[in-house]
Image (cartoon, grey):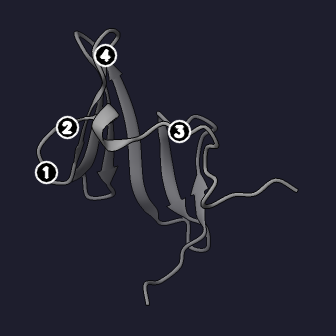
Amino acid sequence: MADLYELTFERDNPCNTTILESETGKILYRVVTEHGENTVTRVDKANGETIASWVWRDVLPDIITIGHGKPISVSSWLKKSLVPLKKWAEQK
């Protein structure tokens, strides 16, 4: 079974934050969004290795790359649902 971690987001902005292991304060990931010709959000391990990137586009679907995989359209990876998170969340 995998270890479970309680994570802390350093900032209240998931597009630009540092993700820490709550108990030790050890940096696990950094999330950085850069604005230029393209807006790109990257998730990097503490050692600087990029493990995912998201290219934001205005007209065409966004492009996501996970690990060393090929870039794919977000619309082919994420599917819309009439009831978001119905498998993992419930209303009380």
- Check disc 1 and give the amino acid type: Gly
Looking at the picture, does residue 44 appear above or below residue 33? below
Which residue shows up at 53% across the image and 79% down it?
4
Q: Observer-nearest residue: 29 or 88?
A: 88
Residue 54 is situated, as x and y percent measured from the top left of the image, at 30, 34
Residue 78 is situated, as x and y percent measured from the top left of the image, at 39, 41
- Nearest to the eye among marks 3 and 2: give it: 2
Dot 4, crowdedness within 10 Å: few (<14), some or many (≥20)? few
Q: CA distance from mark 1 to mark 3?
A: 23 Å
Q: CA distance from mark 3 to mark 4?
A: 18 Å
Which sits earlier in the primary sequence, circle 2 or circle 4?
4
Q: CA distance from mark 1 to mark 4?
A: 20 Å
Dot 1, crowdedness within 10 Å: few (<14), some or many (≥20)? few
- Nearest to the eye among marks 2 and 4: give it: 2
Dot 3, crowdedness within 10 Å: few (<14), some or many (≥20)? some
* Element class at badge 2: strand
Specify whether 25 is left or right of 35.
right
Which sits earlier in the primary sequence, circle 1 or circle 4?
4
Q: CA distance from mark 2 to mark 4?
A: 13 Å
Q: Which residue is mark 4?
A: 57
Looking at the picture, does residue 81 appear above or below residue 21? above
Residue 91 is situated, as x and y percent measured from the top left of the image, at 82, 53
Looking at the picture, does residue 15 appear above or below residue 67? above
Q: Which residue is mark 2?
A: 72
- Check disc 3 and give the amino acid type: Pro
Disc ID at residue 14: 3
- Nearest to the eye among marks 1 and 3: give it: 1
Which sits earlier in the primary sequence, circle 3 or circle 4?
3
- Check disc 4 and give the amino acid type: Arg
Q: Which residue is mark 1?
A: 69
* Element class at badge 4: loop
Which residue shows up at 27% across the image and 46% down it?
52
